[in-house]
């Protein structure tokens, strides 16, 4: 059995060493999304747009998740960090006063 792929892939996509391996997938998009894509890119560039959009989205979500985890960790350690700061404050103040009087 052979599949008809003539005209589907251009030669640069198939044979350049710099191009990553591509796999054809079927996806469902809303009419609104498809309309937006058609307004922004030519028909041959839709896959590239979707590929870049997915990478951008995943990167942004990763950064958001990291920020959320850092924020939660800071909140969880806030009482401990405040206590440590209070314990060291008198010592730091004493050193500062000593240095100031020199």
Image (spheres, rainbow, N blue to C red):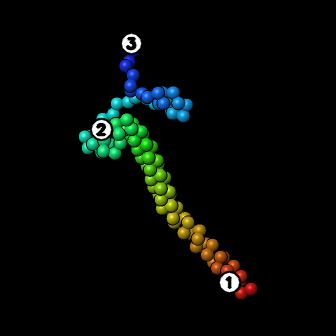
Q: Nearer the viewer, mark 2 or mark 3?
A: 3
Instruction: Name the residue nearer the viewer: 27 or 91.
Output: 27
Q: Of label 1 and label 3, which has the lower sequence position?
A: 3
x, y (%) of residue 14? 48, 27
- Residue 4 left/right relative to 65: left
Residue at 27% across / 40% down in the picture?
30
Q: CA distance from mark 1 to mark 3?
A: 87 Å
Which residue is the site of mark 2? Answer: 29
Instruction: Name the residue nearer the viewer: 79 or 52.
Output: 52
Q: Residue furthest left?
A: 31
Q: Which mark is residue 97?
A: 1
Quadrant containing the N terminus is top left
Corner quadrant of residue 27: top left
Q: Secondary structure at mark 2?
A: loop
Q: CA distance from mark 2 to mark 3?
A: 30 Å
- Residue 7 left/right relative to 75: left
Residue at 50% across / 57% down in the picture?
70
- Vertical placement of 50 versus 89: above or below? above
Which residue is the site of mark 3? Answer: 1
Q: CA distance from mark 2 to mark 1?
A: 68 Å
């Amino acid at each position: 059995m052979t599949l008809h792929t003539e005209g589907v892939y251009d030669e640069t996509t198939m044979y350049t060493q710099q191009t990553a391996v591509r796999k054809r997938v079927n996806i469902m998009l809303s009419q609104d999304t498809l309309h937006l894509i058609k307004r922004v890119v030519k028909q041959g560039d839709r896959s590239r747009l979707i590929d870049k959009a997915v990478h951008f989205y995943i990167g942004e979500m990763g950064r958001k998740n990291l920020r959320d985890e850092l924020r939660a960790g800071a909140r969880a350690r806030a009482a401990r960090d405040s206590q440590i700061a209070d314990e060291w404050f008198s010592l730091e103040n004493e050193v500062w006063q000593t240095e100031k009087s020199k």
